[in-house]
Amino acid sequence: MEPIMFVHLTDTHINVPGKNPLFAIDAGAKLRAMFAEIGNLSQKPAFVIISGDLTQDGDVEDYKYLRQIIAEEQAALDVPVHVALGNHDSRPFFREGYLGDEPSEESYYYTFMEQGLRVAVLNTQIPGEHAGRLDEEQLAWLAQELTVPAPAGTIVVLHHPVVPTPSALMDSHLLANPNDLAEAIADTDVIGLLSGHIHFNSIGLFHGIPSAAGTGVAFGLDPTSTDSMKFIDNSGYNLVLAKGGQMLVHPMAMPGENRMLYEWKIDKDKQPAHAE
Ligand SMILES: [Fe+2]
Ligand SMILES: [Fe+2]
């Protein structure tokens, strides 16, 4: 089987320009710069997958703006772009603004196949909450989908990560029911998991399966900070390879200043931090 190379992006946190800009960064420009960088790779990826927090505020105009950027960049790159939802996203406004469908609270998860590789795109988002969880209906659907193996195996994409981080603070932001997911993918053809949400690269094993979280397109977080969230002006993506029955992940950094944008002192403010 030929290796399949694709790009994993996460946490684009798009806002319509001028509306409540996050740390004065232009998230749309950052996303466009990343697509330009991907277009300059020596090998064209098979597809792009974005693992949630597509928008910062989840308004319908933000999704329309994101749809416009993705439509233009997808046409220029000439590869499919798939998306998942994160805690910053709104199901109805995503459906209306991005998909052009009727707005509804219906969850958004699906599989797609590229060159024999199956990708299962999950929805860990709970409407109105920042924590992530997979509901029983979705877990049952996933287990059913995985009963038939794909030629090159399956990669699971979900916003909230499942492997521990260097920070107890960030560990509290992981998927709330990882054991349910482990049960659904046990003894199946799943070769890897990809996620976002924590805004730094984090790679480990989840019940023996490689699991990689990527840093954000819009901004990064300091993985070592335990009593505050340090927002960093950086940006990156994962180059992912499905090769020989394995998932291989190559974190790629964009040129950037790496300056601190903002520090959210958790103890001092007595507020949960929800910018991630
Ligand atoms: Fe998130
Ligand atoms: Fe995020």
Image (tube, grey):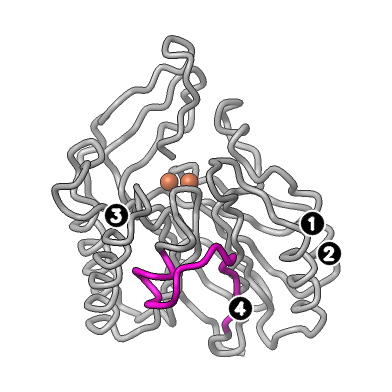
Q: Mark 3 to mark 1: distance in Å? A: 31 Å
Q: Of residues 94 and 158, which is closer to you in this image?
A: 94
Residues at marks 1 and 2 touching, judged by CB atoms closer than 8 Å: yes
Give the residue type that dot 2 points to: Ala
- Does the Cβ of the disc 2 residue fall within 8 Å of ligand 1? no
97 to the left or right of 126: left
Q: Secondary structure at mark 4?
A: strand
| Left or right of residue 122, residue 75 in this image | left
Distance of label 4 from label 3 (alpha carbons): 24 Å
Q: CA distance from mark 4 to mark 1?
A: 18 Å
| Residue under numbered circle 3 | 14
Instruction: Pick the residue in front: 39 or 171.
Output: 171
Q: Which residue is mark 4?
A: 111
Q: CA distance from mark 3 to mark 2?
A: 35 Å
Q: Residue at x 44, y 70 (%)?
A: 95
In this rendering, the answer to whether 176 lies above or below 244 is: above
Q: Looking at the image, is mark 3 or mark 2 earlier in the sequence? A: 3
